[in-house]
Image (cartoon, grey):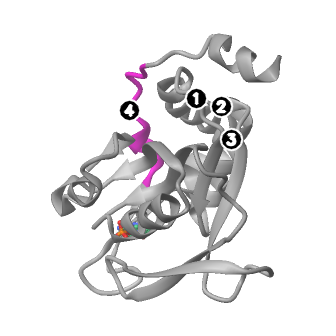
Amino acid sequence: MWQNNRHNSGLASNSKEDFSQHVRNIPDFPQKGIIFRDITGLLRNGPVFKRAIDAIAGHHVEQAIDTVVSIEARGFIIGSALGYRLGSGVVPVRKKGKLPWQVYRKSYNLEYGQDHLEIHQDAIEPGTNVLIVDDVIATGGTVQAVAELIKEMKGNIVGASFLIELTDLNGRDKIKDIPVFSLIKY
Ligand code: AMP
């Protein structure tokens, strides 16, 4: 059965590879003082992208994840690949006004700016094992808002995974009760 197969997928649980060499650092984008971590180079390199996804997936393969909840927009790229690799469903969390059906909404603070996130009201069944995925955890405001949404929907958050963690910003402190994994740390 597909659900059982994902526990025997042969994925390694650890990767020693330094993926940061595929990330471009762009100072003062989108505003002064921010170093933007540009992952497009990592994404366009097929073997590197595959190893990165496999390395993250390997960390979660034993967790019986039902649903990967990923965050617009770059989070969708990582979250979709991970969901496919883990045999999990994928649920989008989107910016305000993008989802077509009834939504739950949370406001959140970004490293730069403030916005609202939305999820379809029927996206998470109570008791569903959820993995939250985004490209970057910076201040943690985004993932905190998503975690609150999922908890209110009675989802069971088993972890939060990121390609990149900006450790100076202590984002993981905002979701202390959730195990955090990140492939690249700055
Ligand atoms: P935060 O809510 O502060 O953890 O910010 C996380 C979100 O903002 C992620 O969805 C990232 O895509 C984006 N983000 C924040 N800081 C950066 C950065 N320095 N480089 C690239 N993306 C970032």
Q: Nearer the viewer, mark 4 or mark 1?
A: 1
| Residue type at tag 3 | Gly
> Which residue is the site of mark 4?
18
Asked if the residue under mark 4 is in contact with the one under mark 3, i.e. CB atoms within 8 Å, the reply is no
Separation of marks 1 and 2 at Cα, in angstroms: 6 Å
Give the residue drawn at x 37%, y 65%. 144
> Which class describes the residues within 10 Å of circle 4: few (<14), some (14-19), or many (20+)?
few
Asked if the residue under mark 2 is in contact with the one under mark 3, i.e. CB atoms within 8 Å, the reply is no
Q: Nearer the viewer, mark 3 or mark 2?
A: 3
Give percent across and percent down for residue 148: 42, 65
> Which residue is the site of mark 2?
47
Separation of marks 3 and 1 at Cα, in angstroms: 15 Å
Q: Say left or right for 109 vs 78.
A: left
Give the residue drawn at x 56%, y 23%. 61
Helix, strand or loop at label 3? It is: helix
| Residue type at tag 1 | Arg
Q: Quadrant of residue 51?
A: top right
| Residue type at tag 2 | Pro
Q: Nearer the viewer, mark 1 or mark 2?
A: 1
The answer to whether 134 is drawn above or below residue 27 in the figure is above
